[in-house]
Amino acid sequence: MRLDKYLCESSDLTRSQARSVLLSGEVTVNGEIIKRGTHVVQDGDEVQWEGETLSLVGLRYLMLNKPAGHECGNRNSQYPPVIDLLDVDKRDRLQTVGRLDVDTTGLILITDDGHWMHRIISPRKRCDKVYLVTLAEPLPENAEVRFQAGIKLEDEEQRGLPAALLRVDERSVRLTIQEGKDFHVKRMFESLGSQVLFLHCERIGPLSLDSDLQAGESRYLTPAEVADLARID
């Protein structure tokens, strides 16, 4: 990797700022002052800027317990982005793997590995997503059968994919789906005449939200968890 790019990848320097500190003689590679941005950094090289050793951030994979009132999209929303809840370097490079509505809580995955992300959200992968749903009204007796057959939403020509519904109590259910359209879960229940009061994502594929992870808290995934999610099929 070129030295100027290495500086940008491992610090908050812009490309022009990287050129400036190089020309000022503030950067060393293995103890030698290097002023050329085209210098190639090899594996094992020690790069220092103003005496501080720099290292590349690398690819990152996190789970976050999303609180209500945060947006999974960009910063143009009236709501704060979930990315701002993370205390990590270069967080502007991170993206949520899919989205949860502003008022939906629970498990959201975050990464800067686009290939890994698309393996999870690709419609062909049919990744299970499990939600705990609290409803305003009890469901009809045949709700399980209707979800299993696929719900036909208003303004859509075809039924959705089959979904599994498990009743927890009179107004709470656990729903497993493999689709992720905007407001999809809420629209499914509205088609049965029931309003969703509370929606919480518990699991994505084989990964469940840590029970001790408080709202707004996050942690890095283990290598095994990253690999398991990549193998979804």
Image (tube, rainbow, N blue to C red):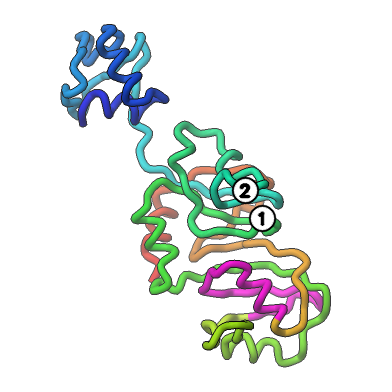
- Please say if the residues under marks 1 and 2 sit with CB atoms less than 8 Å apart: yes
- Vertical placement of residue 154 versus 172, above or below: below
Task: Residue under label 1, please give it.
Answer: 102
Return the x and y of residue 86 as percentages of the image width and height: 56, 38
Depth check, front residue: 100 or 158:
158
Return the x and y of residue 11 as percentages of the image width and height: 39, 25
| Residue 202 seen | yes
Q: Nearer the viewer, mark 1 or mark 2?
A: 2
Return the x and y of residue 127 as percentages of the image width and height: 47, 70
Rendered image quadrant of residue 32: top left
Q: Which residues are magenta?
A: 165-190
Depth check, front residue: 217 or 4:
4
Residue 172 is one of the magenta-drawn residues: yes
Badge 2, how many Cα within 10 Å: few under 14, some, many 20+? few
Q: Looking at the image, which residue is at 35% across and 19% down?
A: 17
Q: Looking at the image, which residue is at 26% across and 19% down?
A: 46
Q: Earlier in the sequence, mark 1 or mark 2?
A: 2
Name the quadrant of the C terminus: bottom left
Badge 1, how many Cα within 10 Å: few under 14, some, many 20+? some
Q: Looking at the image, which residue is at 49% across and 43% down?
A: 220
- Vertical placement of residue 52 versus 80, above or below: above
Estimate the spatial distance between the alpha carbons at disc 1 and disc 2, rounded to whole Å: 10 Å
